């Protein structure tokens, strides 16, 4: 599992870094104005499906079934299942895409009702959304092929494919802009073109992996009906975070102009640790848990979940406090240039701090949900998820007037925390999660080390950014010094407080030892600490 986490996390980190480069260009060229608002809403709809299918409901339903067939009936049965799923999804997603293109104005009234007050902005959002919407079918099919690769425990190509999204987007923004009406149009074309590139890359990878997919006529076989039944509730259960963020966009469209863009840039920063850690842990965890549950290894599954929580919290706890303390310097250095004004820096940094409050919860949702999915239970996460979405909507409505741009982010964080509490309580009650001694001890150490790191960052932030550096290289150097000092402070404090063991670092750095020790160090239940 740890090797899978490192592989997925490494490629996700590269993708996020390129994504920051793309967002920095967007901020400099269009800032938080009407074109930015329209593009981010146009991106939200297909991107919601990407995250739901690529990181949530589809993997939750498909990977356990595919892995089970692969290990019980062999590659032939698993390949047939994947081909049938591809054909059915292509058919229904194609119909959905056509309907979306035809009824985009009506969809826009639902997704961004506040845009209706500005006819020009509304029309632009509809136009850009029609360009980006084909990405839906492309990236959902890419998610299916990624699921096949993940089921085969081949994580590299599936994780690397997301890098293409940012590469193509940057290329289109730089080279296509002179030939289209706005930068938003160039970015929108980049979204759909990247979907073609990602699906093509994954199809080649799965062919090289020995499971070239042929596309049959779509048929609703008993296996497909079971897959759809398991996937439907998972669209909410595994995608609650994304649904909450969509509620944020709806509410933000009703707030002052530019709020949609402010929330987007803030969310992009907190998505770095969320994507690198949360997605990596969740992706690597589900196949392992599914095998252990099918094999009747209950104690091993509990041990695996403990270690996954430990890995997830080790970096997200300090990341959350660091983002809260250093939100303003981060937004200033990353985006504070060109059309992105100092007022935009201030507003987006306040939203970032509110999002960061829920960062550990966002990650733990991705860790705890697979514990249900591996056992074929998608109903309980959906029940808890629906309650979380309802709470998010209520809080958004309560916060939108007094807190403005901070309200949607804070509501999402509180809802995520409640979601994690609900998932954890049910797992505890069922006996599927029992925190062992190592997890309890190390969590206390992580919390103490994170607080110590936050104190160091607080003092250095005022020293380095009391007068914001004017030159770009000096900004980056100051932020780099802040990040380096925080990492050093956390590493020292975490070591002193027992948040990690140097032997774990040795295992992480040694591929040979990882292969030999993953089974005993991760999959097996702890023997010395209970």
Image: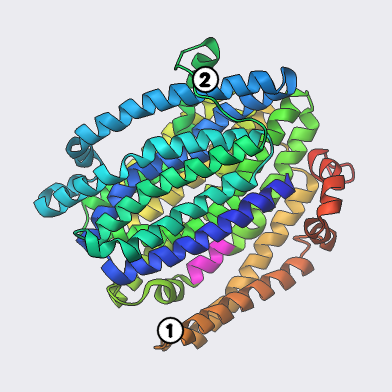
Name the element at disc 2.
helix
- Give the residue drawn at x 63%, y 78%: 485
Number of marks in the rendered image = 2
> Quadrant of the image for the C terminus?
top right
Give the answer, above or below, for where 259 lies relative to 416: below
- Give the residue drawn at x 62%, y 23%: 79
Name the element at disc 1.
helix
Provide the residue designation for mark 2. 84
Farthest top residue in view: 222
- Residue 205 place in picture, x, y as percent: 60, 41
- Residue 199 place in picture, x, y as percent: 48, 40
Magenta stretch in the rendered image:
319-325
Provide the residue designation for mark 1. 472
Q: 90 or 397: nearer the eye?
A: 90
Farthest right residue in view: 528
Please rate how many residues cluster around mark 1, counting C-alpha atoms within 10 Å: few if below 14, some from 14 to 19, many from 20.
few
Q: Residue 13 colored magenta?
A: no
- Residue 444 place in picture, x, y as percent: 70, 57
Give the answer, above or below, for where 411 lies relative to 498: above
Tag on residue 461? Answer: none
> Quadrant of the image for the N terminus?
top right
């Amino acid at each position: 599992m740890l090797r899978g986490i490192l592989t997925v996390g490494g490629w996700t980190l590269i993708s996020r870094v390129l994504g920051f480069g793309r967002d920095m260009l967007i901020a400099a060229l269009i800032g938080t104005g009407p074109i930015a608002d329209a593009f981010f809403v146009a991106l939200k709809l297909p991107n919601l499906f990407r995250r739901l299918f690529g990181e949530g409901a589809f993997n939750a339903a498909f990977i356990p079934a595919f892995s089970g067939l692969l290990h019980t009936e062999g590659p032939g049965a698993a390949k047939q299942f994947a081909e049938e799923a591809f054909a059915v999804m292509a058919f229904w997603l194609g119909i959905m895409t056509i309907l979306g293109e035809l009824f985009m104005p009506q969809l826009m009234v639902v997704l961004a009702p506040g845009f209706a007050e500005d006819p020009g902005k509304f029309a632009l959002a509809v136009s850009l959304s029609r360009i980006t919407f084909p990405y839906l079918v492309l990236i959902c099919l890419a998610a299916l092929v990624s699921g096949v690769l993940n089921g085969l425990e081949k994580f590299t190509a599936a994780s690397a494919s997301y890098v293409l999204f940012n590469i193509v987007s940057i290329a289109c923004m730089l080279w296509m802009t002179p030939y289209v009406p706005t930068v938003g149009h160039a970015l929108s074309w980049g979204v759909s073109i990247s979907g073609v590139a990602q699906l093509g890359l994954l199809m080649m990878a799965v062919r090289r992996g020995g499971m070239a997919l042929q596309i049959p006529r779509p048929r609703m076989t008993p296996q497909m009906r079971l897959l759809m039944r398991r996937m439907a509730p998972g669209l909410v259960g595994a995608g609650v975070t994304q649904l909450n963020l969509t509620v944020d966009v709806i509410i933000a469209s009703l707030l002052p102009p530019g709020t949609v863009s402010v929330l987007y840039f803030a969310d992009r920063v907190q998505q770095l640790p969320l994507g690198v850690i949360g997605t990596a842990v969740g992706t690597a965890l589900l196949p392992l848990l599914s095998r252990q549950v099918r094999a009747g290894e209950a104690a091993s599954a509990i041990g695996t979940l403990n270690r996954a929580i430990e890995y997830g919290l080790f970096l997200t706890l300090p990341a959350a406090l660091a983002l809260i303390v250093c939100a303003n310097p981060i937004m200033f250095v990353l985006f504070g240039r060109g059309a992105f004004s100092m007022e935009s820096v201030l507003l987006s940094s306040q939203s970032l701090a509110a999002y960061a409050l829920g960062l550990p919860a966002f990650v733990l949702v991705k860790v705890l949900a697979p514990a249900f999915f591996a056992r074929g239970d998608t109903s309980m996460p959906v029940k808890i998820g629906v309650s979380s979405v309802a709470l998010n909507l209520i809080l958004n409505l309560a916060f939108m007037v007094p807190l403005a741009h901070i309200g949607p982010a804070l509501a999402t964080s509180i809802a995520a925390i409640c979601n994690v509490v609900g998932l954890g309580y049910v797992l505890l009650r069922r006996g599927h999660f029992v925190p062992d001694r190592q997890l309890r001890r190390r969590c206390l150490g992580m919390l103490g080390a994170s607080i110590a790191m936050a104190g160091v960052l607080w003092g250095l932030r005022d020293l380095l950014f009391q007068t914001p550096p004017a030159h770009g290289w000096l900004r980056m150097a100051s932020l780099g010094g802040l990040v380096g000092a925080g990492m050093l402070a956390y590493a020292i404090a975490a070591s002193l407080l027992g948040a990690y063991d140097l032997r774990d670092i040795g295992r992480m750095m040694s591929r040979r030892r990882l292969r030999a020790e993953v089974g005993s160090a991760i999959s097996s239940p702890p023997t010395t600490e209970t």
